Amino acid sequence: MGCQGGRAQPQILSQTAPALLDPGISPDEVLARPRRIVGWRDLGYERETVLAEPGAPTGPSPIPFDQVAGLVDDAGHVQAVRRQAGNVLEASADPRADGRGAVLTSP
């Protein structure tokens, strides 16, 4: 598992890593889930703010809350490879970024 996201990396990984341990959920599904990130200058805000993608958990917040219109780069780019039963590998890439996850095998 790898992640881009600067200071938000711990937040991003805490929202994705636990679900990747569940073999019943596809890595693609996990990485496409909406996220919430707390930041300020790194996200372009003048003060600490919660950035939430549509569908992310919401609730009362003592700091400003910004519900964005869709998936955003600021919520990170995660790539993951997971070993399933029988040594089968699965790979996935975040829909917030270009690229895709792939498992290559040699002949």
Image (spheres, helix red, strand yellow):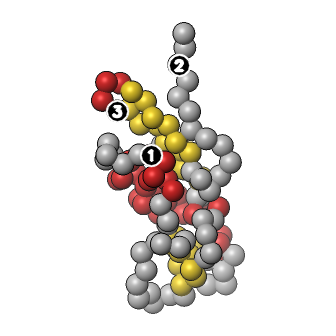
Q: Which residue is mark 3?
A: 84
The residue shown at (58%, 58%) is 76
> Which of the two residues, 73 or 55, is positioned nearer the viewer here?
55
Question: Of the residues shown, which amino acid type is indicated by label 1?
Answer: Pro
Q: Are marks 2 and 3 in contact (CB under 8 Å)?
A: no
Q: Is residue 26 left or right of residue 31?
A: left
Q: Quadrant of residue 64?
A: bottom right
Q: Quadrant of residue 71?
A: bottom right
Q: Is residue 61 left or right of residue 39?
A: left
Percent x, y of residue 105: 53, 19
Percent x, y of residue 66: 58, 82
What secondary structure is marked by label 2? loop
Percent x, y of residue 43: 65, 72
What secondary structure is marked by label 1? helix
Q: CA distance from mark 2 to mark 1?
A: 19 Å
Vertical comparison of 57 with 77: above or below: below
| Lower sequence index among marks 3 and 1 | 1
Label 3, residues with CA under 10 Å away: few <14, some 14-19, many ≥20:
few
What secondary structure is marked by label 3? strand
Q: CA distance from mark 3 to mark 1?
A: 11 Å
Question: Of the residues shown, which amino acid type is indicated by label 3?
Answer: Gln
Is any atom of residue 2 visible in this view? no
Is any atom of residue 29 visible in this view? yes
Question: Of the residues shown, which amino acid type is indicated by label 2?
Answer: Thr
Residue farthest toward the top in the current orientation of the protein:
107
> Which of the two residues, 72 or 54, is positioned nearer the viewer here?
54
| Lower sequence index among marks 2 and 3 | 3
Marking on residue 27: 1
Marking on residue 105: 2
Label 2, residues with CA under 10 Å away: few <14, some 14-19, many ≥20:
few
